[in-house]
Every structure is written in C-alpha cells, then in structure tokens.
C-alpha cells in the first residue's frame, strides 16, 4: 500500500523547477529596478488569473465576468482607504470578505448552468455590476474613478514611486495565495473539483454534492480575485471603472488560456507574457498591440491546446 | 423511453437480471430508481425508507449505487484517484480543502484494495486503460460508495464475449449481502449469473421470476426470446 500513497505524495512534492521559478520572481529587484511598477502589475494580474484557474482550470466553470470580483475587491479597498482606514492589510481582509460574499451570492445562480448559458450568465452579471458602479457615481466616482484614496504605510514602508514596496507587497500576497491554492488543489476538495471537470454526470453517482463543491470553489475564487483587486487599489492609489470592465474579464481569460489552464503556474506565466508583450508592443504602436496578442492566442490555441505550459510540460514531468 | 405500472421488490442479496428488447425502458427504470429521472407518480423505497424525493447523490449516500452502459469515468484522473475520490466522498472528507491527499492513507488504501480485487492497475490514467479495465473501473467506483443495492447497466457492453465471462465472474464474486440488478442482453450470462429475472417490454414489467420459470414462460418466448431465437 506504500506505493498507493506515493502515487499521491509525488504530486504534492515541491519540484526544483518550482523553487527556481519563485527565486526568479525576486530578480526584478536587482535586474530591472526601473520596471518594478510593471512587475507589480504582473503579479496582480497573475493572482487574478490564478483565481480564475481555480474555477476554470480545475472545476471547469467558464466565466466571462470574473472582473466582477476583482472590481468588488478594488472598490472595497478603495472606499475603506478613502473614508476610514488606510492600512493596506486591513484593506485586503475587507476586500476578500466583500468579494467572497458577492461570489457566494452569485454562486447560487452560476452553478445551475453550464456551457454557453454559463458564459452568457457570467457575462451578464459582470456587465450589470459594471453599470451599477457607473451609475452609483456618488459612491464610486463613476467614470471618473474613485479619487482621494489614501493608502497608508505597510509595516512602515511607504508606497514609493519606483514601485519597490508595491512589487514586494504584490509578490508576497501572490505567493501566499499561491500556497493556499496549491494546498487546495492537492486536497480531497481539489480532487473533487477535478472530478467535476472530468465528468459532471458521474459525480452525483459516486455520492458527490457537486453544486455545493462548485459554490465553495466559486467563493474561494472570488475571494482571491477580490484580493487581487485590492492590491491594484493599494499599489496605484486609485480605482477606475475599468476594474469591472468586460475587457478585464476577457483579458484574464486570454492570459489563462495562453499560459495553460489547470496547472496553477499557467496564469502566472500567461500574465508575464501578456503584460510584457503589452508593455513592449504598445511602446512601438499603441493602437496596434492587441494584434500580436490575438496572433499569439490563435497560435497557442491551434498548436498548444493546453497552453504554453502544456506545451513545455512535454519536456518536463507533469505537475498534476 | 417510458416506464409505467412498475411494481418491483429487490430483496437483499438477490441477483436480478433485467432483460427486454431495446427501448423496453430498462435504463429508464434504472434512472428512475437512482433519481436521475423524476417519476410522474409512484414511490421508491430503500430498506423501508422512502427515497422518491431524494437527489441522486443523497440516494448514493443511502446505499444505492449504479454503473453506466457507456463509460462515465474521469478520463484524466488515474484509476486510483477516481476510486479514492469516491471513498472520500462517501466518508464526508471531500469538502476538506486544507489537508493534503497523502494524509488520507486509509481512503487511499481502501481504494487500492477495491482496484486490486478487480485487478485494475491504479496508477494509470483512466483514458489510457484498456476498454475492459475501464468497464471494471465503472464497477469499482460504484463499490467504493459501499452500496447495499448495486445497479449495473450492461456492465459488459462492448466487451468481447470471451472477456465478458471474466467480468461477470468478478461480479459474481462480490459480497452475497449485496443486492444486484444488472441489465444484460447475452442470455447465456443472464441464466448463469441471475437468481431472478425481470422481463420488461414496452415500458412495463411483463413477468418476473426464477430463471427456469422465465425460460418456460410462453409470453417471454413470444415477445422476447422468440425474436432472438427465430
């Protein structure tokens, strides 16, 4: 029976490649100190993509409205910092709770649907929230964005213009959320999510309460997305209506598909490629940069159906 | 695809074969029993307790498990992961998101034991298993729920005749406490493994009884056996 247990423990074990990867995330401090603000944006986007991976990559729930939770987190953190309390860690907690409540409420509707209906439903809910925030301009600042967000210091460090604190903060939160996500996918609950993704018909036949599992997964994903939104607020000291936009929902989906869904690192790799490409290409031609992203997406979907990481995993032992 | 006027009792430990021509409503009956379809009228009891209103996964928890005619497995999970998942769901551990799977050694060992008893290799990914072993994994998943009543929808569907005997030997070797109802078209298998036979035609139960009674029954010969032996 020792070998049966090893079948599971091998997958949980940390690989050298993973350790090396996380060590590399420290390189921007030394190698590209002028790009720390960008690195911070990448870490935030990676966290957002990671949250989508939990529901899309593991539970198989497609969403075109995931920005809803990012936005709820961003506004919660912004409103808290503007009116009451500027300390960022408290903001993270408040944003996580607010996004979690929104996610739990929406999960009751979302888990009843699949496929096209699910895509349209999440899209619709996302648009609803976007317009609600737009019209509630007294609270959110509407299309002008939420002004006057005063973010306090983090353990005595101010958010500097070079983005040192911002990147350290975003990276640390990304890493902690990654550890939690990694634990989740290697737990019984994570196995149940993969079961739902692999065969939703079979799950009830082995006694599994699929909808309860999905509600929980959706809520956890919303919490992490909300934390990502709060990070953006804290590192930029502003909240624009864009945090709730359809564009953001679509981008995070593109990022996850590019990197490879269902393998934890896919969203992170996707975020690095996407954000760096946007930064570089838009410098060359601001109008045209999405052309290259489109081309990359088409190429990846055609030739690497499991994303860039899926393609690379042919050369490395599989992760899951 | 209808079933009506069904009056059926499955005493503990009896092995039933459910036979009948295509479209007789055999799978429909199984879907009604497991809750995958809701009946317009009537009641279903399990061990004296009414389960008519229970959702499918709650019926499984009460001890009613099924397999599927067309493989309904988890293609990218290994056989061991699949059966371990079923054991974890049964024991109420599948909501646990904070402990690593290797810590659930008892569930893993039990799953490995079920797979060993059916001679299915656990470490291989399901979609790479030979078809016959996928059919056995269908049964392993149902067994992992520790059922009192096991419904097998054509367990040997698509399996070559020489392999299907081994598959039914495995079924015959299951606990005598377990009530089994299986749908099967091969009459040799039916008469060898069933202690009782239920014949369905046109959505109704035509007749039920011991194999020798069924073999002698004129109506059965006419509408069912008559067709195949004509």
Image (cartoon, coloured by chain):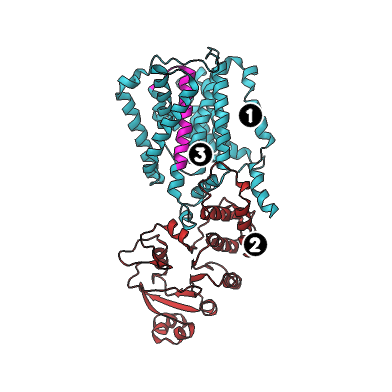
Residue A288 falls left or right of residue B41:
right
Magenta residues span: A216-240
Question: In percent of the image, x 40 and y 14: which residue is there?
Answer: A148
Image position of B195 (left or right of A124) = right
Q: Can you give x and y, in whole percent of width and height, for residue A45 in the image?
A: 51, 27
**Lower sequence index among marks 3 and 1:** 1
Seen at 38% across and 15% down, the residue is A147
Residue B217 showing in the rendered view: yes
The disc label shown at residue A22, or none: 1
Q: What chain is colored red?
A: B
- Determine if residue A285 is in view: no
Q: Give the image location of residue A152, x and y in percent.
A: 48, 15
Between A37 and A302, the one nearer to me in the picture: A37
In-front residue for pair A47/A295: A47
- In three-dimensional space, the C-alpha distance between marks 3 and 1, rounded to whole angstroms, equals 20 Å
Task: Answer whether residue A224 is magenta in the image.
Answer: yes
Q: Nearer the viewer, mark 1 or mark 2?
A: 2
Question: Closest to the observer: A277 or A196?
Answer: A196
Per the picture, the main secondary structure of the magenta-coloured stretch is helix
Looking at the image, is A183 positioned above or below residue A75? below
Residue at the spot of label 2: B116
Q: Secondary structure at mark 3?
A: helix
Q: Chain A takes which shade in the image?
A: cyan
């Amino acid at each position: 029976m020792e070998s049966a247990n090893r079948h599971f423990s091998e997958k949980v074990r940390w690989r050298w490649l993973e350790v090396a990867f996380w060590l590399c995330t420290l390189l921007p401090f030394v190698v590209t100190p002028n790009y720390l603000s960008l690195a911070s944006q990448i870490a935030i986007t990676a966290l957002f993509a990671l949250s989508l991976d939990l529901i899309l990559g593991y539970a198989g729930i497609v969403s075109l409205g995931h920005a809803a939770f990012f936005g709820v987190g961003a506004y919660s953190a912004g409103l808290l910092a503007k009116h009451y309390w500027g300390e960022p860690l408290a903001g993270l907690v408040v944003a996580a709770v607010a996004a979690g409540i929104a996610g739990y409420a929406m999960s009751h509707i979302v888990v009843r649907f699949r496929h096209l209906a699910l895509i349209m439903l999440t899209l619709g809910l996302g648009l609803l929230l976007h317009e609600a925030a737009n019209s509630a301009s007294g609270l959110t600042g509407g299309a002008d964005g939420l002004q006057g967000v005063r973010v306090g210091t983090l353990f005595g460090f101010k958010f500097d213009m070079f983005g040192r604190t911002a990147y350290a903060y975003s990276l640390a939160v990304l890493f902690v959320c990654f550890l939690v996500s990694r634990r989740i996918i290697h737990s019984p609950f994570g196995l149940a999510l993969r079961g739902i993704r692999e065969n939703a018909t079979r799950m009830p036949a082995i006694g599994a309460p699929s909808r309860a599992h999905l509600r929980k997964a959706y809520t956890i994903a919303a919490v992490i997305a909300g934390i990502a939104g709060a990070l953006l607020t804290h590192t930029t000291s502003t909240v624009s209506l864009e945090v709730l936009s359809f564009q953001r929902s679509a981008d995070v989906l593109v990022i996850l598909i590019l990197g490879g869904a269902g393998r934890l690192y896919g969203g992170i790799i996707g975020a690095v490629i996407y954000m760096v490409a946007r930064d570089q290409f838009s410098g060359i031609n601001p109008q045209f940069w999405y052309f290259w992203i489109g081309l990359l997406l088409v190429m990846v979907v055609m030739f690497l159906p499991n994303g860039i990481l899926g393609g690379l995993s042919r050369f490395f032992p599989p992760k899951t | 695809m209808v079933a009506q006027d069904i009056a059926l009792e499955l005493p503990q430990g009896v092995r039933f074969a459910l036979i009948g021509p295509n479209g007789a409503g055999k799978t429909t009956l199984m879907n009604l029993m497991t809750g995958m379809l809701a009946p317009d009228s009537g009641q279903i009891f399990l061990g004296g307790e009414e389960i008519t209103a229970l959702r499918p996964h709650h019926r499984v928890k009460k001890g009613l498990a099924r397999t599927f005619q067309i493989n309904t497995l988890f293609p990218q999970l290994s056989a061991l992961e699949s059966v371990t998942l079923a054991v974890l769901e049964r024991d109420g551990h599948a909501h646990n998101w904070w402990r690593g799977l290797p810590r659930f050694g008892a569930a893993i060992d039990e799953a490995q034991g079920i797979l060993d008893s059916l001679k299915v290799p656990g470490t291989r990914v399901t979609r790479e298993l030979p078809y016959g072993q996928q059919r056995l994994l269908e049964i392993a998943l149902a067994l992992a729920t520790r059922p009192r009543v096991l419904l097998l929808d054509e367990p040997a569907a698509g399996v070559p005749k020489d392999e299907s005997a081994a598959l039914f030997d495995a079924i015959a070797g299951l606990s005598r406490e377990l009530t089994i109802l299986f749908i099967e078209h091969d009459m040799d298998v039916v008469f060898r493994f069933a202690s009782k036979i239920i014949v369905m035609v046109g959505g109704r139960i035509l007749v039920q009884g011991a194999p020798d009674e069924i073999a002698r029954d004129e109506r059965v010969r006419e509408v069912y056996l008559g067709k195949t032996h004509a």
